Amino acid sequence: MTGFDPMELPWEAWRPEDVYGRLAGLGVPWHVAAGWSIDLYLGGERRAHEDLEIAVPAARFHEVAAALPELEFFALADSLAHPVESEPEILERSHQTWGLDRAARVWRIDVFREPSDGDTWICRRDESIRFEGGGHIERTPAGIPYGRPELTLLFKAKHSREKDEDDLEAVLAVLEPERRRYLAELLERVHPGHPWIERCAREDSNPRPTASEKTGS
């Protein structure tokens, strides 16, 4: 088994609209994930993003890879990047798959390969959390699909870095009360006692602006 340090090569990530233009007609239920998905929900780019993550059903990853022929994909395992083409078994050891631009020799995208059952999305942190028919995906006015913020924040809660805390605060400022309660329920299920739970469940009697009102879009 071979591999190399992925940090030997730089990131020059695509933007969400770049990927949308390439995958819009594919028919695979993909969506923008992680930090960029929060900004798409809020309606504006709040901070710089050094990479771009999208999520796709693991069973349909090869369809997505085929739609991005300029990229060579590497699975991240044991802190090394392993070539998927010559080591297909590596896909069983990691859900992250970085796309390397063959010509430019830079990373363009990180594809998360997510569990699914037919058209049902399954949360990799807790298989009891499931959404049918793309219910885990929302879209911008331009049509770009992104993961609903409650699920993005559930994944971010594991590490709770400064940028994750900032994303939480930005989303809670506009998220409807019932959705904040749902996020608190998810956190209690996956991360019992997490400090975000009380913050998500906190009642707020003041009217909350929508995401579009918050960003002025």
Image (cartoon, helix red, strand yellow):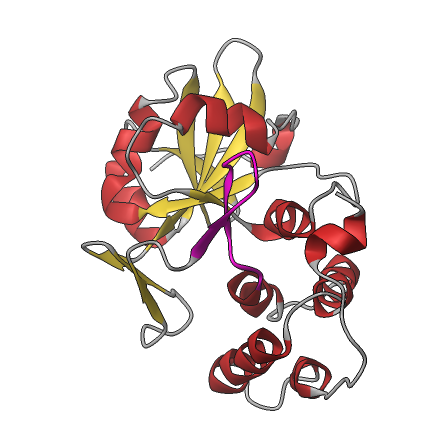
Placement of 177 over or under 155, stated as above or below: below
Does the magenta run of residues contain 73?
no
Does the magenta run of residues contain 145?
yes
Q: Is residue 133 left or right of residue 4?
A: left
Q: Residue at x 28, y 51 (%)?
A: 92
Placement of 116 over or under 81, stated as above or below: below
Q: Residue at x 63, y 45 (%)?
A: 40
Q: Is residue 37 left or right of residue 125?
A: right
Image coords of residue 200 (percent x, y): 67, 80
Q: Quadrant of residue 119?
A: bottom left
Q: Is residue 23 left or right of residue 34?
A: left
Q: Quadrant of residue 46?
A: top right
Is residue 70 something that shows in the picture? Answer: yes
Q: Residue furthest top?
A: 103
Query: As rendered, which of 202 and 51 lies closer to the eye?
Result: 202
Image coords of residue 192 (percent x, y): 55, 89
Find the magenta span and give its range.
137-149
Image coords of residue 74 (percent x, y): 42, 33
Query: As rendered, which of 168 and 87 lies closer to the eye?
Result: 168
